[in-house]
Every structure is written in C-alpha cells, then in structure tokens.
Image: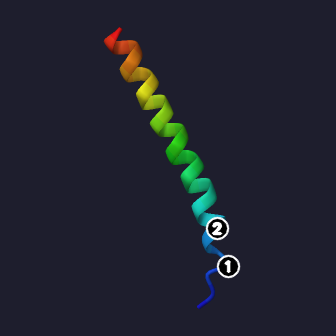
Amino acid sequence: MSASFLPAIFVPLSAIAAFVAMGLFFLYVEADA
C-alpha cells in the first residue's frame, strides 16, 4: 500500500475546504454587518 496517492487527494481537498471556509466566513461577516 503506497501513500503516493495521498497528496493528490489531500491537496485539492484542502483547497476546496479553504475555499468553502472563506466563503462561509465572508457570508457570515456580510450578514452580520
């Protein structure tokens, strides 16, 4: 079992997670303001 495929899954997943978190934070700030 090789772990060479792990970065190929983790990199896009972390990018999507960061994008979603930023979007939700932006919506929260805009709704609160």
In x, y percent, where is residue 11? 62, 58
Residue extending farthest left: 32
Asked whether the beta carbons under mark 1 and mark 2 sit within 8 Å of each other, the answer is yes
Structural crowding at the residue carrying mark 1, measured as other residues with C-alpha within 10 Å and reported as few (<14), some (14–19) or many (≥20): few
Front-lying residue, 33 or 27 = 33
- Report helix, strand or loop for mark 2: helix
In x, y percent, where is residue 27? 42, 21
Q: Residue at x 60, y 72 (%)?
A: 6
Location of residue 29 with respect to 4 vertically, above or below: above
Identify which amino acid the numbered label 2 is placed on. Pro
Structural crowding at the residue carrying mark 2, measured as other residues with C-alpha within 10 Å and reported as few (<14), some (14–19) or many (≥20): few
In x, y percent, where is residue 15? 59, 48
Residue 1 appears in which quarter of the rendering?
bottom right
State the mark number for residue 16.
none
Total marks placed: 2
Location of residue 3 with respect to 32 vertically, above or below: below
Q: Residue at x 42, y 30 (%)?
A: 24
Mark 2 lies on residue: 7
Residue 21 appears in which quarter of the rendering?
top left
Identify which amino acid the numbered label 1 is placed on. Ser
- Report helix, strand or loop for mark 1: loop
Location of residue 7 with respect to 31 vertically, above or below: below
Mark 1 lies on residue: 4
Q: Report how far apart the C-alphas of labels 1 and 2 lie in the structure.
A: 7 Å
Determine whether, in the image, residue 8 is placed left or right of residue 19: right
